[in-house]
Each structure stands twice: as structure tokens, then as C-alpha cells.
Image: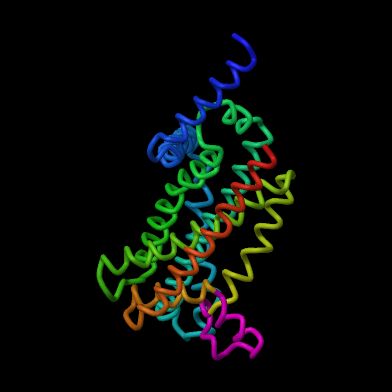
Amino acid sequence: MTDTAMETGTVQAAHARSKRPYGLARHSLLLAGRSLTKTRRNPGVLLDALFMPIIFLLLFVYLFGGAVSGSTREYLQYVFPGVLVMTMLLTGMLATGLSINTDIKKGVFDRFRSLPIGRSAPLAGLVLGDVIRYVVAAVVLFATGYLLGFRVQTDLPSALAAVGLATALGFSLSWINVLIGVLIREVAVVQSVAFLGIFPLAFGTDMVVPADTLPGWLQAWVKVNPVSDAVDAARGLLLGGPVADAAIRTLLWSAGFLAVFGPLAAHVYRRRS
């Protein structure tokens, strides 16, 4: 076969693959299944999702509860929605970039390039596969909260909606860490940058104390911080109160982060690979 014929065949094969309906979605889901298989064979990767919610809830309730509310039980009701949002953020952002960076360094993504799949499918599949981490973290958090005395004041659909909103924001922000994991070559640097980036978002809210007790400059940050909207929405869904405005803003922020950082991470990955 001549070089021209081979090139023509390659182009035709690529064109045929591109015309397959929902090809990228199918490939991403297939690779998400690979990620879940890795998790099943190595359940130790879920340790942070198992222990992080417990540590944060115990730390905040018993460290700040008496000083802020005068009662750890009352403070538990106040802080739990914020811990839920923070847990979903940390679950999505701290592990995803490291996983991608590790797979790239091991040559796993080099093998993916030889397969007839969408170039962005490995990234999307790895992020989708981390959904199990969100589920585990949410179940552990609610179980721990219930044992400590937390009670949902609304209903089950509202509680599920609170988890869904927190997960949506965590999932969309995880693409920032995907970008970091693709862009930076050293695992230690990826982890450091992820920590530095997430803490102003997670803690610059009224999660721990009411916003009106904070200094003016920090109140200004709380008002524009997208995580504050997620905390307010989760608090309303779990305890009762206004929800609609904060929930809409959370969804808009989530869509915006996903629309910006998803394609950007895919672009950087294609250039690097």
C-alpha cells in the first residue's frame, strides 16, 4: 500500500470515528469505568474521602462550637452545611490533578493516544470516575453528623439537592486542578498549588462564623466568593430558609467554571500530548 493510500485510509477512519454519535461521551464513560475498576482494586485511594469529612466535622464542632455558639450541638447545625460544601470541593480538587499527573508520568495517557478515542476522553473519564469519591464523602459526612446530633430540618429531596449543588461546584472546580495536573510536571508542585488555590475559596465564607463578625475586607471577599453561594444554598436546603437565589448563582458559577476550565484543560493536554 502506498503512502498516499495509507494517509487516505487514516483520514477516512478518523472521519468515520468523528461521525459516530456521542463518541466523546461514550469514550469518557468507558474510561470512567476504568477509573472505577482501579478504585475497586485499590480501595485505599478512598481514604481521604472516608476520613476527611470526619476530621473536619469533629475539628470545627469541638474547636469552635463553644466559642461561637456556646453549644456544640447548635454549632453543629450551623457549620454542617459549610463542611458539606468544603468536603465536596476538597474531594474533587485535591485528588484529580494528582491522578492525572501520575498517569501522564507513567505513560498511561501515551497509550490512550494510540486508541481511536476522543483526545479529551481520558481527562473526562478520570474526572467522572471520581464521582464515587463524592458519594463516599457525602455518606460518611452525613453518618458522622447524625451520630454527633445533626438533623436535617427540611426533607430528603432537599438534602439530596444540597449534596447535588455542592457536588456540582466541586466537580466544576476540579477542572482547575485538572488543568494544573496537565500543566505542571511535578506531583509535589501540583499538590502545593492545589492547596494554595482551594483554601481561600473554602474558608473565605461564612461557613465557620457569620459574615458580619468578619473584618470589612474579608466580608468583601465573602460576598463575591462563589463558595459562599453554595454554603448559603446548602444551609437553606438542609435547615430551611431562602434557597433560590443562592442555588441559581451556584449553578451559574458551576457552569461558568466548567465552560472555561474544561476546554482549557483539554487544550493544554492536547498540546502536551
**Residue sitting at 44 percent across and 82 percent down?**
71
Q: Up-down: is 59 above or below 180?
A: below
Q: Is residue 180 magenta?
A: no
Q: Nearer the viewer, residue 64 or 137?
A: 137
Q: Up-down: is 236 above or below 173?
A: below
Q: Nearer the viewer, residue 211 or 2?
A: 2
Q: Is residue 216 magenta?
A: yes
Rendering quarter of residue 204: bottom right
Rendering quarter of residue 212: bottom right
Q: Up-down: is 111 above or below 152?
A: above
**Residue 55, percent across and down?**
52, 61
**Residue sitting at 42 percent across and 77 percent down?**
246
**Residue 239, percent across and down?**
34, 77
**Residue 146, percent across and down?**
35, 65
**Residue sitting at 49 percent across and 52 percent down?**
49
Tell whether 98 sits left or right of 43: right
Tell whether 223 sits left or right of 132: right
Position of the N terminus by quadrant = top right
Residue, far top: 1
Q: Nearer the viewer, residue 97 or 245?
A: 245
Tell whether 90 sits left or right of 188: left
* Total marks placed: 0
Q: Up-down: is 136 above or below 102?
A: below
**Residue sitting at 49 percent across and 45 percent down?**
46
Q: Which residues are magenta?
A: 206-225
Position of the C terminus by quadrant = top right
